[in-house]
Image (cartoon, rainbow, N blue to C red):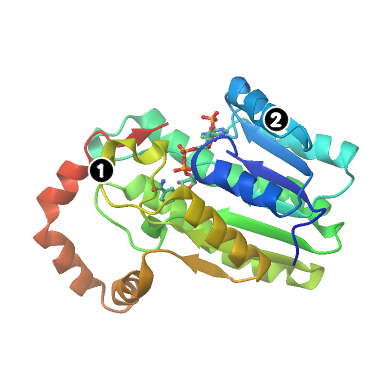
């Protein structure tokens, strides 16, 4: 698959990994980009940065069903089809489950999971109308391995993986590919709390995820060979992984404290 001339919709394209994906798209020759994000000002600034690109700015919360319906309706009206859907917007609120505010549990499920199901649902007819459709879902390493104090975030991200596998098989007869990306710690606003820690750059995560999308890779896993080995141990011998986590329980607890990006 080539990027040139493709019509693309991305959620959360104004900051972090999404912003770098937008750069990758434009560098690859995309000239029609629809972007959903809450902050109107950053959407406007983004479109002013690239006067040569036709932006469809959709300001709103992906947790709002009307915003998602409007996005699909505007794309149908203006373009008539969609080539690439990128479900990237995400939020996090970590900590012991019993201490998480109920609203932050609901919001993480709404933004990280329900919005992806609904937006994809609304975009499927548009993707089927493309000559070669593709979906990129941004999950997380925490969607592969469930870690303490990230029970809510991790479960939404595991759902993204399962959804990606299911919908890929469902859409296979329609020439719509589905790639799921699993970043580990990446230096964005979401990880501001961990400033100074060694992390992947959002540019690298964006580049590799888009490469995966273009090559129709099913999964793009970050964190090297070790992450893949850990996932295998976690799946095949979960008690072994439990013991490993138990050794550093207090460290995991302390590091999750105050990790919020909502
Ligand atoms: N950073 C990491 O270490 C890491 C690791 C693994 C996975 N991920 C995943 O990668 C994706 C991108 O993360 P990031 O680190 O790039 O995040 P980020 O820097 O916090 O940027 C989030 C982007 O999503 C938008 N957004 C957030 N909530 C939204 C909502 N309710 N409705 C519409 N747009 C919303 C934001 O714009 P507005 O605020 O204007 O809405 C922004 O453009 C997320 O799904 C995240 O879970 C990140």
For the residue pair 82 and 151, the one nearer the viewer reads as: 82
Q: Residue at x 18, y 50 (%)?
A: 252
* Element class at badge 1: loop
Query: Where does residue 10 sit, x and y in percent of width and height?
Result: 65, 44
Which label number is shown at residue 196? 1
For the residue pair 113 and 206, the one nearer the viewer reads as: 206
Q: Is residue 203 visible?
A: yes
Crowdedness of circle 1 by 10 Å Cα count: few (<14), some, many (20+)?
A: few
Q: Would residue 128 be found to the left or right of residue 212 on screen?
A: right
Query: Where does residue 95 sit, x and y in percent of width and height?
Result: 25, 40
Ligand 1 has an atom within 8 Å of the beta carbon of the residue at disc 2: no
Q: Quadrant of residue 19?
A: top right
Above or below, 225 relative to 144: below
Q: Residue at x 32, y 29 (%)?
A: 101
Crowdedness of circle 2 by 10 Å Cα count: few (<14), some, many (20+)?
A: some
Q: Quadrant of residue 12?
A: top right
Q: Would residue 79 be found to the left or right of residue 18 on screen?
A: right
Q: Is residue 66 visible?
A: no
Quarter holding the C terminus is top left
Which residue appears farthest toward the bottom when viewing the image?
236
Query: Where does residue 109 sit, x and y in percent of width and height?
Result: 47, 42
For the residue pair 181 and 188, the one nearer the viewer reads as: 188
Query: Where does residue 34 sit, x and y in percent of width and height?
Result: 73, 39
The residue beneath circle 2 is 47
Q: Would residue 11 be found to the left or right of residue 229 on screen?
A: right
Q: Earlier in the sequence, mark 1 or mark 2?
A: 2
Q: Residue at x 51, y 66 (%)?
A: 220
């Amino acid at each position: 698959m080539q990027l040139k001339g493709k019509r693309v919709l991305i959620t959360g394209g104004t900051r972090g990994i999404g912003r770098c994906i937008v750069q990758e798209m434009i560098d690859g020759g995309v000239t029609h980009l629809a972007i959903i994000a809450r902050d109107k000002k950053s959407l406007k600034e983004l479109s002013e940065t690239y006067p040569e690109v036709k932006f469809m700015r959709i300001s709103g919360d992906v947790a709002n069903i009307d915003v998602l319906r409007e996005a699909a309706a505007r794309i149908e009206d203006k373009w008539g089809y969609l080539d690439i859907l990128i479900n990237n917007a995400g939020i996090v609120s970590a900590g012991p489950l019993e201490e998480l505010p109920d609203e932050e549990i609901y919001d993480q499920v709404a933004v990280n999971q329900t919005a992806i199901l609904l937006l994809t649902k609304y975009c499927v007819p548009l993707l089927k109308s493309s000559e070669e459709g593709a979906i990129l879902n941004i999950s997380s390493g925490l969607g592969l391995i469930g870690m303490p104090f990230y029970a809510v975030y991790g479960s939404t991200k595991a759902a993204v993986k399962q959804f990606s596998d299911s919908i890929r098989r469902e859409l296979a007869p329609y020439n719509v590919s589905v790639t799921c990306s699993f970043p580990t710690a990446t230096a964005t606003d979401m990880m501001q709390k961990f400033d100074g820690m060694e992390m992947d750059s959002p540019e690298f995560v964006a580049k590799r995820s888009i490469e995966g999308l273009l090559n129709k890779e099913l999964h793009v896993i970050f964190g090297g060979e070790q992450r893949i080995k850990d996932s295998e141990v976690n799946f095949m011998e979960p008690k072994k992984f439990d013991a490993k986590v138990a050794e550093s329980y207090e460290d995991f607890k302390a590091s999750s404290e105050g990790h919020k990006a909502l």
